[in-house]
Image: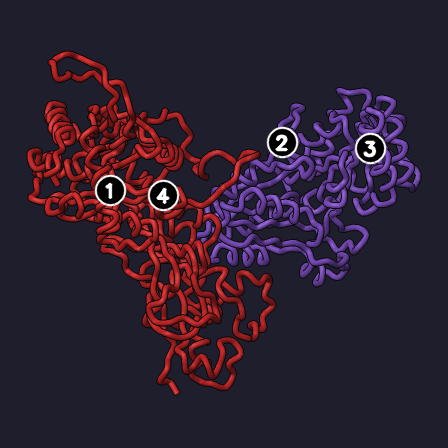
Amino acid sequence: MTYLQAISDGLRQEMRRDKRVFVIGEDVGVYGGAFKVTLGFQEEFGPWRVIDAPLSETAIVGGCTGAAMMGMRPVAEMQFADFISCAWDHLVTVAAKQRWRAGTPVPITVRLPSGGGFSGGPFHSQNPESSFAHIPGLKVICPATPEDAKGLLATAIQDPNPCLYFEHKHLYRRLKAEVPDERYETPFGKARIHREGDDVSVITWGAMVHTADEAAQQLDGEGISVEIVDLRTLIPWDKQAVLQSVSKTSKVVVLHEDTLTGGFGGEIAATIAEEAFEDLDGPLKRIAAPDTPVPFSPVLEKAYLPQVEDVVAGIKEVVEY
Amino acid sequence: MATASAIDVVMPQMGVSVSEGTITKWLKQEGEPVAADESLLEISTDKVDTEVPSPGSGVVQQILVQEGETVEVGTKLAVIAPEGAAAEAPPQEAAPAPATQEAAAEALSPSSSEGETPAPQASPPAPQAPPPEPAPAQPAPSPAPAAAGDGNVGGDRTFVSPVVARIASEHGVDVNQVSGTGRGGRVTKKDILAFVEAGGQAEQPAAAAPPAPPEPAAPEAAAATQAAPPPPPPEPAPAAATAPPPPPAPAPPAAAPAPPPAAPAAPAPAAAPSQPGESYEPVTAMRRGIAEHMRRSLDTSAHVTSAIEVDMSKVVGLRKKLKKEYQASYGVNPTYLAFVARATVETLRDYPWINGELRGDQIVTRNHVNLGFAVELADGKGLIVPVVRNTEGLNLLGMARAISDIAVKARDKKLLPDDVQGGTFTITNPGGYGTFHGTPVISQPQAAILGTYAVVKRPWVITDDRGEDVIAIRPIMNLTLTYDHRLVDGALAGRFLRDLRAKLESWGESDY
């Protein structure tokens, strides 16, 4: 099952078992969504549970917030994660704070196709997860595997808080793996050790897990044993797993596709410095995209996104210190 | 020009077994003049605290090791610019004068002291003023790895990473003894773990000995290892060291409660997390030495204490008489301690084992008594046991004078390493504070230690001229003998105390 099918499958199962769940977004109905995640959903669940919305992210998230406060469990789709900025105010000012303000749960899930690697340019390739990780009240989910994609979506839909579900476009059809048929929930805040190793910890999430994995395979031949920690969710994030891995390897690379400055990697690096200082055997390294918009040009985009070679070089630098 | 070259001040060798010392105080600062043999700094080793005289006259050009740092013997501590050179060109901005320039350069980079022991672990907060070396034109992702890594700045100066520092302190390892495979020869976590695993522990014989923590040693294994303090690394040791000397229960060595094997020995990072209201100070070399010795002594000897009460009437009377004379003629105070010491030396003649030592398969006895006296240091933060040699040749006056001399030397930190070695028997005198009983710890490898306590007026049953019992007021002193029951039996100790009491109670005018 592909990563995309896993999302689709998980969403369908959730809608079948819970009548409060409905889908809203641009072209999610008749067209089946920009990436066909909801293909066939309208036939199965009808136009009232699979709603084609006008071209207004503000209206979609605003509507979801109201519906959630009235007891529904809306799942909104942004065609691209980049467009979420239009709904910033509803999400950040209302949805994220409602629980603290009035005690009302706001169980929204916003699906956010994110990430680059297909020459989508500056408006269709971003990974804005760290912007939302900074907002108290929101949860941030970044699945890296089909199995997690399905399980984390179920958890997100059932969570009483607004959840931003970043699904990586680059993984949609490239990634295939076994996924359990039955419904299951993958808990938030529990990292997954994607690969065990002794010499260096790579802390990452989303598509970069696979970039790190390729790098690790290369380095394995050179006698460098790489541990990859897939955070799975950034809010909440699994500090314990990270600190444990750091105490084992004492060397750290933090890798993400988002831009460097203010990226969530900085938070992880700071936490390691604060809580695992005496475990470190060298400076930590962050590998991330440079602080510019994502370029269109395939050549430039390749230079922009962290590539396997970049990760190999970064790991070596840290290990050889 | 190079006639007057800079003089190096190095960490002196203070006794055979001393391998490192801590700078406790610089008595001269950079830029201050200093004369040859004038005290330049104070150091503390695990044997003595002492002042180090300047090896030459001149101006303190640079201090390379800061107060509080511990370095190996032979490490360069400071540079003194000889008078001539210093006068014509003060340390820092000495542009033209080649001699001083050279000296300054040498001082600035510890690495260039080829002949010297490479300044180990050098001085992190050492002189700033990095040479105006143009940073290598390289994207240099972050300054840290560049500086420590490219080896063109620090030379043999080794950066110790946090995890390596922690492992080193947990295992009592001197990082400088580990060969590094990291960039620029840096000692990596793997290097030091391999070193520890290979059993390579720095000096510290027993104190920091517990082996690598990961494997929770089974109780038997621990007991079998040696008589040294048993497992889990940091916790028990400091606890035992700071606690008052435990009661003289015949502590069987290695009987320390084996930790429950379940104890997760993995997270060794020191004791409990800090609590509000606590404050911290580093353990001095002396305190570490005391802690180690106390623990080791209790783990070695079978401590037993016997006590006896002594009627000091005769001594008190004689002392009153002698005091004026001694002070007027010799400037010496005949203390009770001097009387007790004198009587002890006499009594030890008849009890060679109590002045002896259990050394392997041999029992050592001697024809001399080298008497150690426990002396508290002025700041109340330490104790040292200077030794008066050959006390069998001293009369009361000589004893009083010798005790007074070493006490002054100890408090002024003027003791030399030989002054604290070679004791055969020790007297400790906590009675000055009014205590009447105690169970001191034997100074290894001796067989016993005598405790003297306060002289107190007490109602005392004596026999009067008519042979009847009457109650008199008498100055009574308690004496304790804490002895190693492996060598000294209780009856022997009892007879020793009896004879010692008899000497003190019958002290006559002609007994000196």
| Mark 4 → mark 2, Cα distance in angstroms | 69 Å
Kindly identify the residue that appears in the image at 48 percent across and 68 percent down: B30
Give the chain coloured purple. A
Q: Residues within 10 Å of mark 2 (few under 14, many from 20)?
A: some
SS category of the residue bearing label 2: loop
At label 3, counting other C-alpha atoms closer than 10 Å, the crowd grade (few under 14, some 14-19, many 20 or more) is: many
> How far separated are the C-alphas under marks 3 and 1?
87 Å
**Which chain is disc 2 placed on?**
A
**C-alpha gap between disc 3 and disc 4:** 60 Å
What is the x, y in percent for residue B161?
Answer: 47, 53
B52 up-or-down from B399: above or below: below
> Mark 1 vs mark 2: same chain?
no
Three-letter code, disc 1: Lys
The residue that mark 3 highlights is A97
The residue that mark 2 highlights is A179
CA distance separating discs 3 and 2 = 35 Å
Q: Give the letter of the red chain.
A: B
Query: Mark 3 falls within which chain?
Result: A
At mark 1, the secondary structure is helix
Q: Which mark is residue B323?
A: 1
Residue B101 on image: x %, y %: 46, 80
**Disc sitting over residue B287 in the figure:** none
- Kindly report which numbered mark, 3 or 1, lies closer to the viewer in this rendering: 1
Q: How many marks?
A: 4
Tell me the distance, in whole angstroms, between the alpha carbons under discs 1 and 4.
30 Å
Residue B122 percent location from the top left of the image = 42, 61
Whether callout 1 and callout 4 share a subunit is answered yes
Q: Earlier in the sequence, mark 1 or mark 4?
A: 1
Q: Residue at x 40, y 70 (%)?
A: B34
Q: Which residue is mark 4?
A: B382
